[in-house]
């Protein structure tokens, strides 16, 4: 029996028209901050911090309800796609089971 689920969403956003880091941060940072405030998530800017035209945003959540984790990550992905002045190049969702029958032997 699963103890819970950890869900991770990774999203790469691209803005090839942006010419400097300050302009990119002004597009990405407000979306990240609003996402943290609106949903029960941990959100971080993971990669591309020194690139001016792309960035990878990571989102994580934890629950004992698989459906809730899945739906929350879907809402986060939709929010990221809808709220920013960039284009989503790709997104990946991974949900990991915590605990389980194999852990009962320990």
Image (spheres, grey):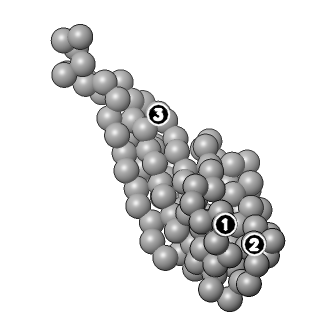
Asked which quadrant contains residue 29, the reply is bottom right
Q: Which residue is mark 2?
A: 21
| Residue 58 in sight here | yes
Which residue sits at x=63%, y=56%? 45
Q: Nearer the viewer, residue 20 or 7?
A: 20
Asked whether the residues under the numbered discs 1 and 2 touch, taking CB atoms below 8 Å apart as contact, a structural biologist would say yes
Q: Which residue is mark 1?
A: 50
Where the C terminus falls, by quadrant? top left
Count of marks placed on residues = 3
Which residue sits at x=60%, y=65%? 48
Q: Mark 3 or mark 1, which has the lower sequence index? A: 1
Q: Which residue is mark 3?
A: 63
Q: Is residue 60 left or right of residue 3?
A: right
Q: Is residue 2 left or right of residue 78?
A: left
Q: Nearer the viewer, residue 11 or 41?
A: 11
Q: Is residue 87 left or right of residue 52?
A: left
Q: Nearer the viewer, residue 56 or 100?
A: 56
């Amino acid at each position: 029996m699963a103890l819970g689920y950890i869900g991770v969403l990774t999203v790469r956003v691209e803005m090839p028209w942006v010419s400097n880091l300050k302009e990119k941060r002004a597009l990405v940072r407000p979306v990240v901050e609003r996402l943290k405030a609106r949903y029960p998530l941990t959100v971080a800017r993971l990669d591309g911090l020194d690139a001016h035209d792309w960035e990878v945003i990571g989102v994580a959540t934890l629950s004992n309800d698989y459906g809730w984790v899945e739906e929350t990550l879907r809402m986060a992905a939709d929010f990221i796609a809808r709220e920013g002045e960039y284009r989503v190049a790709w997104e990946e969702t991974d949900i990991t089971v915590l605990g389980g029958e194999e852990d009962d032997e320990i």
